[in-house]
Structure formats: structure tokens, C-alpha cells
Image: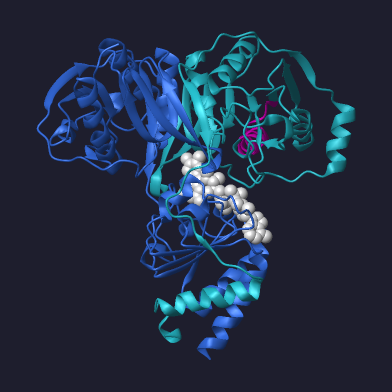
Chain colours: A cyan, B blue
Amino acid sequence: MQIIVPMQQTVDLVEELELNDDGTGVEREYLKFVANEWDEQALEEALLLKEAAGGSVTVVGIDETDVDGTLFSALAKGADRAVKLTGDFENGISSHQRAAILAAWLGTQEFDLVMVGVQSPEDLDGQTGVILANLLDTAHVSVAIGVEPHEGGVKVRQEFGGGTVHELALSGRAVVGVQAATAAPRYVSISRVRAAMQDSPLETLPAADVDAPTGTTVRRLYAPESSSHAEMLEGDADAVAARILEIVRERGIVKELS
Amino acid sequence: MGSDVFTLVEHVGGTVDDSTHELLGKARELATATGGRSVACLLHSGARAGADGLAADVVLSVEHPALEHFLPEAYVKALAALVADHEPRVVLVANSTVGMDVAGGLSARTGNGLVAYCNAITLEGDTLVAISQVFGGKLNAEVAVEGPAICSVVSGSFAPATGGSPDIQDVTASGIDNLTTTFLARIEPEASDVDITAEDILVSVGRGIGGADNIEFAQELADALGGVVSGSRPVTDAGWLSKTRQVGKSGQKVKPKLYIACGISGAPEHLEGMSDAELIIAINSDANAPIFDVAHFGTTEDVLDVLPALTEQIEAAVA
Ligand SMILES: Cc1cc2nc3c(=O)[nH]c(=O)nc-3n(C[C@H](O)[C@H](O)[C@H](O)COP(=O)(O)OP(=O)(O)OC[C@H]3O[C@@H](n4cnc5c(N)ncnc54)[C@H](O)[C@@H]3O)c2cc1C
């Protein structure tokens, strides 16, 4: 089975998110970027599927900050090929644009299955995988929590609210949006990533020039104005603990304390 | 572009999900503003009764064997056909598994603008303005759509509307006879060792706890308080806690008397499961973490310092 895993770089949410000058996006120049965590789950599930069914895993990234590291790390984990689609993407990429670029590239590739993260923290115009599937006119399944070989195709476990699961069989080409891999993503040491950098170069080619309007305009980004921000407890851990004890006691939540 | 407001009905065998009633509440308001109708789209096989009593002006009932269970491919194609025929001003779907699997595809197939993760929608003249929760809930985006729009809506955003006597119209399904997806089975979640929805006190751990070995600090606090340990999705995905203890959109919805969030950022999918707790105390080293917007009290001290300190003080107070 030939599996393609698109990997997206997204801002590290632990960072303070500064806005750009006109307030319509985050200031990408100074932020730290990491691989989208759901794409990491998709990669893991793809590697597990390859181990079960044979075939290959190709990772493909668009030229976003630090994407090389993500692609080399995927190679070190067991991906067979890594492709980087270059271009000027400093201002970020909408999901529609991302999907259109990937669809154009996939048009030149042989593949059976695309496995991609179910969402990313930035996909305000929708999730890339589903858009991609519909541009390719293939089947798709989002919120997958397991993919295994099944009668020449795959069987996908799709999760719903509260933990209900549907099992679906896919018999043709398809795009699967992965929520969680069957196992936690494997760890790879820095030395193996370095080795991958030396052994297997990235295949680099220009991203297709696509016209993919989202039909939407971001007017502004802002931190949610909460009507009720938490009252912050001051002091060191012991002082904070003492205040929490007081609060819990006042409210009579723990009988032994009242 | 017409003026109707479409809502995708989410249901299992005709039993309609609460999220649909919330969407219909908003749809009615939007339809009043556009001067169009609120139209509910019920895709089903033998579950036409699901249309009864929906708070919509019209229900388009599309019946086909491929629509017996949720099949992403069938839903997208059937809904795209309805949208192409009727050209609604707005299509509302829930930001659920179903909605996530339909909204993007509908946008790709129709070219209509999509705003995901919406928690507010208004009309300013001809412009639809939606607020989208992005960056894990850390930022809101105000998004304008001039043409026909699709909004996927976060659960709990709108007041539900129920009780109606819609005009139910049967529509023939098109384009879904040859699918490459087959439904195999529906599996209900396993019975749980502990029912976190029945507990008064939850000490809930997130990725910020740092590793499986540190769960014991939360367990010790829970023991001292007479509560149990629950967690966020990454914690159960990593196997640090059993799946039955997961709080949130794809886990349990809880409403304890006390919820102590330990190293949980407060992503919308997590808040969906716990924001109604009576007292929420959040321990998170990031002062901008969205969890502080729903918490009553908070601290940015290290969770690995606060947990043992609190356990010690509570044990001392009880003794
Ligand atoms: C379809 C779908 C369904 C989902 N369902 C759920 C669900 O049911 N439940 C759920 O929880 N999530 C769910 N998610 C995932 C959700 O989007 C978030 O990824 C998740 O809630 C984040 O978990 P977290 O807060 O534990 O981790 P993170 O977001 O990584 O947050 C960790 C936090 O810990 C803090 N921290 C780090 N170190 C320390 C320290 N030493 N002391 C104090 N604080 C520290 C950090 O500042 C950070 O805010 C779902 C996602 C999807 C796509």
C-alpha cells in the first residue's frame, strides 16, 4: 500500500501568540513552529499500517518554517521518502490553498491512501483532509482512531462523541483524517534524525501555483474577552495550596474539611 | 444565492442530537434576518420520523439505503446536491465528527466559504460574520463571508429550539449509488471501571503533568479529597490514564462540584466536557492558557509543586 502523509507546521501553542501589524494573523516571523500534532498521529498510524500491510510511506511538506526538521524526523521514524514543495508561504496557508497544492502534486503521484491529521490549530476555513478528498473526488473519513488492512483496502475506526465508534471499509483511494494513532507516536533520537539528514535528501520541487479562494475574509484576530477570567492566586506553591484549601473548605465541598 | 438557512440534522436512526436543536435555534434567527426559511436536511434510511417536531419551517427528507448510518462520502454528496439545487444563504453543521467530515467537502464541492469552529454568527446586511475559535482556543477570528456560507458550530454555542411542525418534503437522493465506503459496525464504548460523570470531585490531568509517572501526584490529591482522577485526551491517548476517564468532546461531559485542572490548556474540545463544573481551579504555567477563561481560580505555579503541597495541606487539615 502506497501511503502519503502531508505534514503541516503550526505555531507552538505554548508560545505567546503575537499578532501581525493589521491584526489579521499571527506574527509568523518570531514564533516557534512545530509539526501539527495530529499529523504526527497520522504518520504513526501510516507507519503501523505499512508494517502490517507492506508498501511505502511518503511524507510531503509545504515550505513552512522548520518543515525540514519535521520531514527528516519522519524519515528517521521509518518513512521511505520525503518531499518538500517550495514557494513563498511566509504569510501562512489556508486549508483550501494547502489542499489545492497537495491535490496538484498528488495528481503526479501513485498512491492508495492519504493519511493526514484530522485538524490543525489554524484551519479556520476547514480541515485540509476533507477538502483534499473532495478535490480528488475520493472517499474520506475524519476522526479516525485506527486504520488496518482489510480485503485489499482498509478498515477505518471512526470515533464519535462519547466514544462510540463506527467501523468503515474503504475499497478505493481515500483520504483519512487521523485523530489518534493506535499507539503513541514513536520516539526518535536526535542522532537518528541527523543520520537521516545525511543519508536521504529531501526531494524538493516547486509547489503548484494554485487559485484556491476560501470565500472568507479574516477581519481580525483577538484573544477571547472572557467575562469571567479566573481570579489568580498569588504566592509560591505552598501559599497557593493554602488558598485552595481555604476555598475548598469555605464551599464545604469536602465534608472532612468543614 | 437564496435566502434560506440550511441545517444538517445529526441523528442516529432518527434520534436527533442535541447539537441539531442548537443549530436550529440559530437558523431560525438567521432566517428571520435573511427573510428566508429555516430548512433542516435529514439524510436517512427509514428514519423519516426524525423530522417530526423539528423547529424548522421545512425538512428536506432524503432517503437512501446508503444513508442508514453516517457514511461521510454519502453525506457530502447528498448534501452537496441539495445545496446545488436550493442555493441556501447559510449551511449550519455541528463541529462534530459528522460536521468535520462534511463541511470541508461541501465547501470544496460548492465553492461556498467555510468558517470552522464557530461560536457566534451574525448578519451585517449581506455579510455573514462568524467568530471562529482557533489556535486551540487561544485566539478568536472574526471572519466575514460575502457569498453563500457554511459554518461548523462548536457545541453549546447557541440556545436550542425545539417544538415545531415543519413541512416535510421528500427529495430523491442523487449521486450516491456507487460508493467506495461500506459501513461495517457500530461499537458502543465499553462499560467503565469508574463513572467520572457521577463524581463530585475530579482532579484532572493534562499533558502538562509531564508523564505517566507523575499521575500519582494527582492520584494522591484525589485520594486526600475523596475524588477521582480524570484527564484530557492526550493523556488517555498516551495510555497514562484509561480512556474511560477522558473529559471532553470525545470523552465524558462532567459537572462535578470541584474540578481541578492540572496542566490542561483548555482547548475547546476539552472545555465542552467540563465548563459547567461548579468550581474550577486551574493550575497552568501559561498565564494565557484558555483554561483560565472558564476557571474560577487559577495559578501559574508549576503543577508538580502545587499538587504535593496541596495534598500535604489537605491531609494535615483532615488529620
Ligand atoms: C475531534 C476531536 C475530539 C477531541 N476530543 C477531546 C476530548 O474529548 N478531550 C480533550 O481533552 N481533548 C480533546 N481533543 C483534543 C484537544 O483539541 C486538545 O488537543 C487537548 O484537549 C489538549 O490537551 P491538554 O490540555 O492536556 O494538552 P496541551 O494543550 O498540550 O496543554 C498542556 C498545558 O500544560 C501546561 N503546562 C506544561 N507544563 C506545566 C507545568 N509544569 N505546570 C503547569 N502547567 C504546565 C501548558 O502551559 C499547557 O497549557 C479533541 C480533538 C479533536 C480534533
- Indicate left or right for A145 with B111 as reference: right
Q: Is residue A41 on the magenta stretch? A: yes
Q: Is residue B265 on the magenta stretch? A: no
Give the x, y percent position of residue B106: 40, 20
Looking at the image, which residue sits at the far bottom? Answer: B319
Q: Residue at x 30, y 11 (%)?
A: B1
| Among the 4 quarters of the image, the one containing residue B13 | top left
Q: Residue at x 73, y 34 (%)?
A: A30
Magenta span of residues: A39-58
Q: Would you place residue B283 above or below residue B74 in this image? A: below
Q: Would you place residue A164 above or below residue A138 in this image? A: below
Q: Would you place residue B190 above or below residue B200 in this image? A: above
- Indicate left or right for A195 with B25 as reference: right
Q: Residue at x 27, y 24 (%)?
A: B6
Q: How many marks?
A: 0
**Which sits in the foreground, B52 or B86?**
B86
**Which sits in the foreground, B51 or B28?**
B28
- Indicate left or right for A199 with A186 as reference: right
Give the x, y percent position of residue B272: 41, 49
Kindly tell me whether residue A190 is visible in this rendering.
Answer: yes
Give the x, y percent position of residue A80: 75, 27
Looking at the image, which residue sits at the far front? Answer: A21
Magenta stretch: helix, strand or loop mostly: helix
Kindly tell me whether residue A164 is visible in this rendering.
Answer: no
| Among the 4 quarters of the image, the one containing residue A254 | bottom left
